[in-house]
Image: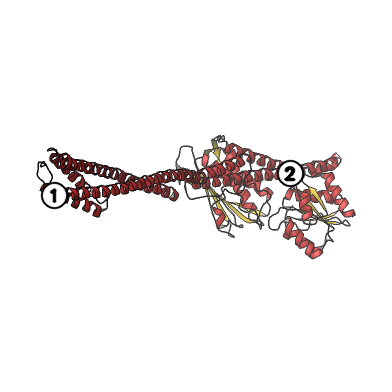
């Protein structure tokens, strides 16, 4: 499967759409697989530009966002997102930065998923954010 | 330096004036002595006259002549401008007059003085008294002049002493300002750096030796600061880099665990491949960090052995192709090359070259890899069609911890800023070199040229 896939073939029916943005293909696919297994629909993007294209096609219920990416980084993407959609789409920041909480506040993220995260933490954060 | 010269000049001038003044004092003393002799001779003349006139002694005329001759000599010596010349002239005229008058008298006194003799004697005596008066005036004048000269000399001595003290104080102030204070500043600066505080650069007081030293010190401090910060950033970046593979491995394992064995089966190959890739990534990260430390300590030893370079290149290309599906890695030319190299390290170099080519051509496309012989050496080149390297950064890209794309939108999470540094160091240890050609926006081609055997000179170009 290709990391350039904008619309994952693993979309299952009925679930909420989650957009995952990360430049590491392994991490991207893994998070996608985990969420699909939980019954979400998933869109994958490997940078900010691809992520914006995804949103144009279908507005997700949640964005999982890495910060440092080539082409368009997380901060720029978040700014575009807020300009276009306001705060209607919650954003969860995934970053290896120690100050991920601070980074999350910087872009007005709804939650943060520091790295290294694990399966339990991933589910927790996604469920909590969607429940709000 | 100017102040120094000025102080020395002032000291010399004061010294010269002092010397000139003191040389005039002995002359005045001598003149004063002369005047005393003149006074004495005048008294002698008076005595001789009285002996002639009243005691009628025959030797009186002889005494007169002897004394008169001496007086004449003293009067000649007075003539050097120190004493009022009219006074000297008057004395001389009067002396001639009384001498001439005395000559008119008989050489041996008669028994009774004549009336003429009485008148001449009276006149001569009156003249002698006048001369005495003038001489005394002269003596007083000379005495006053002498006193004056002494006083002036004293003032000069005091001024000289004061000048020397001033020079010393000035020199001290000068040295304090130009040497001691800057040295103190340097010392404080060095101590600050010793505590790991790199503040603002030290102020450079003057364009002298210490100013130069301060400049060098600032440069050192600046370089140290950059290196320290770069090292901190490197460590921080390395730690961040480790977190992503750890997250992937951990989540993969936990994800697999939640399925019963029979359901795990179908997911297993993909998950294992993923975990394997991330483990390799971790391994490379750790190797990079270790290598930087080793190279820093000059402890990296090459483990050369005969290696099929073509096979090595193909292997790395295949591996990189699997993690970057959006790029097409093409082996444009692959000569058969067998060389005596450290295969692990050369693999690291090829990996870094490909990794950079992929990272900095984000929109994908072809990456051409070539391997060819060139005399006693072989060359590996990797060409991408990515963003290229800005001209102003080309000079620095081999620097340790330098990240050419830091702060741009191409800043890459997976860049530690050591790949090119390590690659070039490894090439150099092999007796080879590494270089590149690039224009911003038009991609880059990196070349590594290594000798086939350790002693061949093929890579000297």
Q: Is residue B30 left or right of residue B333?
A: left
Q: Is residue B86 left or right of residue A68?
A: left
Residue at 19% x, 44% y is B71
Marks 2,1: beta carbons within 8 A:
no
**Label 1: which secondary element:** helix
Viewer-proximal residue, B2 or A3?
Answer: B2
Query: Mark 2 vs mark 1: which is more N-terminal?
Result: 1
Q: Is residue B375 visible?
A: no
Residue A80 location in percent, x, y? 76, 62
The circle on residue B115 is: 1
Colour scheme in the image? secondary structure
In the image, is residue B273 above or below residue A10?
above
* Parent chain of label 2: B
Residue B302 location in percent, x, y? 55, 35
Residue lying furthest right in this view?
A131
For the residues beneath circles 2 and 1, the answer to whether they share a chain is yes
Residue A103 location in percent, x, y? 76, 52
The circle on residue B243 is: 2
Q: Is residue B343 left or right of residue A41?
A: left
* Parent chain of label 1: B
Q: Is residue B289 left or right of residue B47?
A: right
């Amino acid at each position: 499967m290709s990391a350039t896939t904008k619309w994952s073939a693993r979309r299952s029916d009925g679930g909420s759409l989650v957009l995952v943005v990360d430049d590491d293909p392994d991490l991207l696919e893994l998070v996608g697989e985990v969420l699909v297994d939980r019954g979400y629909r998933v869109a994958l993007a490997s940078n900010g530009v691809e992520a914006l294209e995804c949103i144009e096609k279908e507005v997700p219920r949640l964005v999982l966002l890495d910060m440092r990416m080539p082409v368009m980084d997380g901060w720029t993407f978040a700014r575009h997102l807020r300009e276009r959609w306001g705060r209607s789409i919650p954003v969860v920041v995934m970053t290896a930065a120690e100050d991920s909480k601070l980074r999350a506040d910087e872009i007005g993220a709804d939650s943060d998923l520091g790295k290294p995260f694990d399966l339990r933490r991933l589910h927790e954060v996604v469920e909590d954010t969607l429940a709000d | 330096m100017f102040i120094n010269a000025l102080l020395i000049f002032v000291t010399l001038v004061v010294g010269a004036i002092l010397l000139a003044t003191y040389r005039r004092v002995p002359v005045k003393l001598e003149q004063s002595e002369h005047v005393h002799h003149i006074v004495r001779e005048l008294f002698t003349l008076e005595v001789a006259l009285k002996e002639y006139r009243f005691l009628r002694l025959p030797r009186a005329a002889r005494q007169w002549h002897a004394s008169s001759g001496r007086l004449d000599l003293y009067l000649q010596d007075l003539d050097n401008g120190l004493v009022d010349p009219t006074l000297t002239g008057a004395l001389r005229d009067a002396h001639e007059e009384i001498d001439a008058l005395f000559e008119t008298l008989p050489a041996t006194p008669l028994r009774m003085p004549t009336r003429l003799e009485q008148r001449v004697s009276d006149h001569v005596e009156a003249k002698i008294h006048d001369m005495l008066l003038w001489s005394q005036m002269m003596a007083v004048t000379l005495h006053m002049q002498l006193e004056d000269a002494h006083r002036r000399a004293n003032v000069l001595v005091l001024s000289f002493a004061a000048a020397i003290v001033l020079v010393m104080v000035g020199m001290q102030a000068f040295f304090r300002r130009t040497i001691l204070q800057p040295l103190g500043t340097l010392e404080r600066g060095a101590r600050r750096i010793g505590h790991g505080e790199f503040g603002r650069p030290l102020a450079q007081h003057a364009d002298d030796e210490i100013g130069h030293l301060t400049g060098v010190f600032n440069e050192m401090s600046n370089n140290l600061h950059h290196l320290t910060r770069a090292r901190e950033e490197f460590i921080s970046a390395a730690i961040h880099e480790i977190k992503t593979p750890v997250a992937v491995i951990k989540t993969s394992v936990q994800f697999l665990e939640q399925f019963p064995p029979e359901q795990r089966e179908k997911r297993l190959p993909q998950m294992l491949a993923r975990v394997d890739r991330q483990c390799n990534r971790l391994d490379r990260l750790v190797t990079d960090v270790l290598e930087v430390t080793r190279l820093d300590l000059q402890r990296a030893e090459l483990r050369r052995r005969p290696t099929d370079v073509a096979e090595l290149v193909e292997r790395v290309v295949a591996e990189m192709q699997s993690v970057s599906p959006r790029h097409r890695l093409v082996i444009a030319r692959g000569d058969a090359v067998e060389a005596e190299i450290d295969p692990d390290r050369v693999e690291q170099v090829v990996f870094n070259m490909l990794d950079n080519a992929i990272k900095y051509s984000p929109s994908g496309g072809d990456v051409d890899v070539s391997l060819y012989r060139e005399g006693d050496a072989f060359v590996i080149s990797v060409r991408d069609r990515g963003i290229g390297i800005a001209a102003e950064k080309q000079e620095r890209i081999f620097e340790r911890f330098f990240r050419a794309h830091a702060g741009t939108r191409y800043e890459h999470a997976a860049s530690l800023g050591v790949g090119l540094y390590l690659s070039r160091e490894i090439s150099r240890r092999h007796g080879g070199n590494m270089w590149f050609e690039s224009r911003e926006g038009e991609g880059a081609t990196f070349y590594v040229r290594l000798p086939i055997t350790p002693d061949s000179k093929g890579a000297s170009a």
